[in-house]
């Protein structure tokens, strides 16, 4: 399968980035293809220009960085987004990515107040991190709001099948080696849980070859 991993964290040695890298290692081990778009390292511009609101309707071509990002989304079978929750939402660079890349005419169409997703046939895995424990997010209702606004309103509304929203709570520096190992283990388990069949199929085909 072809995977696109979109990750957003300014620190290259952050837990967010380490989890994303461990996920790609597991995907590779399972025999999958993957591409990572590390938004901070590639310098993705999150600011939407005035001609980007409905470029297709206005017969204008989207900017080059948006076309490249949209091509990667269109080519993937699975999109995985990895990001910290800041103020119970995604970092601004990722929100800008969503605003510009998941544009009307590419990710969705809307008529008469009804939205139709255009990215059907693809799956999505959402991975988030927070300093707050999950229990607190759940008790305060923040987790339900996060799921409604991010899982449902963005990804499911665009046509994705959300396989899982994996959350890591109590992520506060310094992170001990044992804790990090447990976290990366959960991340790799997630990949195996949903995508291990590719390796099984590959090994089966190999064993049947003359």
Image (cartoon, helix red, strand yellow):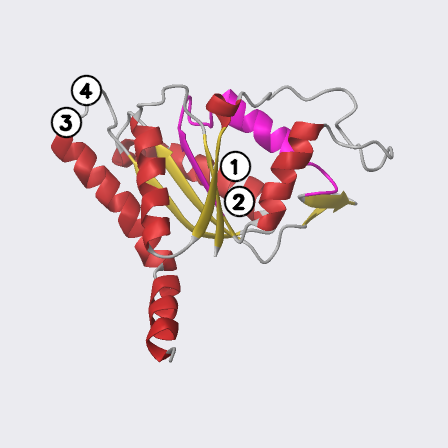
Residue with the mark numbered 4: 174
Q: For label 3, count other residues whose C-alpha is less than 10 Å away and answer few (under 14), some (14-19) or many (20+).
A: few
Among numbered discs 4 and 2, the one appearing first in the sequence:
2
| Mark number, residue 149 | 1
Residue 158 visible (yes or no):
no
**Front: mark 3 or 1:** 3
Quick check: 180 left or right of 146?
left
Residue 182 falls left or right of residue 158: left
CA gap, disc 1 to disc 2?
Answer: 6 Å
Residue 117 located left or right of residue 62: left
Residue 93 belongs to the span the image colors magenta: yes
In the image, which is nearer the foreground, mark 1 or mark 4?
4
Which residue is at 59% across, 42% downward? 72
Nearer the camera: disc 4 or disc 2? 4
Under circle 1, the secondary element is helix
Other residues around mark 1 within 10 Å, as few (<14) / some (14–19) / many (≥20): few
Task: Name the residue tied to disc 2.
Answer: 152
Q: Residue at x 58, y 58 (%)?
A: 121
Residue wearing tag 3: 176
Between discs 3 and 1, the one toward the N terminus? 1
State if disc 1 and disc 3 touch (CB < 8 Å): no
Q: Are marks 4 and 2 in contact (CB under 8 Å)?
A: no
Q: Which residues are magenta?
A: 79-106
Q: Residue furthest front?
A: 210
How many circles with numbers are drawn on the protein? 4
Question: Does the CB distance between marks 3 and 4 fall below 8 Å?
Answer: yes
């Amino acid at each position: 399968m072809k995977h696109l991993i979109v990750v957003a964290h300014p620190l290259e040695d952050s837990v967010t980035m380490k989890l994303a890298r461990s996920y790609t290692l597991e995907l590779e081990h399972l025999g999958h293809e993957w591409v990572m778009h590390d938004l901070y390292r590639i310098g993705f511009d999150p600011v939407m220009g005035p001609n980007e609101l409905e470029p297709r309707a206005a017969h204008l071509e989207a900017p080059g960085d948006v076309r490249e990002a949209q091509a990667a989304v269109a080519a993937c079978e699975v999109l995985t987004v990895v990001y910290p929750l800041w103020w119970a939402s995604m970092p601004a660079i990722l929100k800008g990515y969503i605003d510009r890349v998941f544009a009307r005419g590419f990710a969705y169409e809307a008529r008469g107040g009804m939205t139709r997703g255009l990215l059907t046939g693809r799956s999505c895995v959402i991975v988030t991190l927070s300093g707050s424990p999950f229990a607190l997010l759940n008790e305060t209702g923040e987790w339900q709001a996060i799921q409604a606004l991010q899982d449902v309103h963005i990804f499911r509304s665009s046509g994705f099948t959300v396989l899982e929203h994996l959350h890591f709570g109590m992520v506060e520096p310094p992170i001990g080696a044992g804790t990090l190992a447990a976290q990366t283990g959960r991340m790799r388990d997630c990949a195996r849980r949903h995508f291990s069949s590719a390796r099984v199929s590959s090994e089966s085909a190999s064993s049947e070859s003359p």
